[in-house]
Image (cartoon, grey):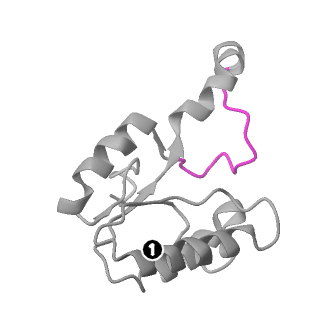
Amino acid sequence: MMVLPNYSPDFQRISVDAMTAALSSTGVRLVVVLSSCGADKAAGAGPVVGLHHFEQQINTLDAVVPRLRAGCFMENLLSQVETIRRAGVIAAPFDPDVAMPFIATTEIGRAAAYSPLTPDLRIGHSRAAGRM
């Protein structure tokens, strides 16, 4: 289960409420959730701010709900290959002093397969930065 970034007002909240209501009525016992860094923040997390509500709502399900808090998708850098090759930088609207964890989507899939065994995985985060 995953939620798209919040590009319009209330989009994530409406989607999350509909998904959790549907799952509550089905009796599903395992729901693997793709969340993100910033889901612990109720505000100020940009387009992922709705993931806080998402995680709060999935906590109400009568099911095992492993959460995968992935970093940025490595594949999103593909459009910047030429800029990286020429200038040696990633052009993004982020503070250059903030470490940005990246992970390949295939690794997220592998983690999802193992997630029922380890319910709260933080994938694609730097251990050196004190995160897992």
Which residue occupies the extreme left position in the image?
A: 117
- Magenta segment, which residues? 88-100
Q: Along the line of sight, which residue is nearer the eye, 84 or 43? A: 43
> Vertically, is 98 above or below 67?
above
Magenta stretch contains residue 123? no
Residue drawn at x 59%, y 60% is 3
Q: Along the line of sight, which residue is nearer the eye, 34 or 31? A: 31
Q: Along the line of sight, which residue is nearer the eye, 38 or 17? A: 17
Residue drawn at x 53%, y 70% is 39
Whether residue 25 is visible, yes or no, is: yes
Q: Residues within 10 Å of mark 1 (few under 14, many from 20)?
A: some
Is 125 situated left or right of 95 in this image?
left
Residue picked out by circle 1:
23
State the image coordinates of residue 71 (x, y, percent, origin top left): 49, 50
Label 1 SS: helix
State the image coordinates of residue 102 (x, y, percent, origin top left): 49, 41
Whether residue 41 is visible, yes or no, is: no
Is 43 situated left or right of 105 in this image?
right
Q: Main secondary structure of the magenta part?
A: loop
Give the residue type at disc 1: Leu
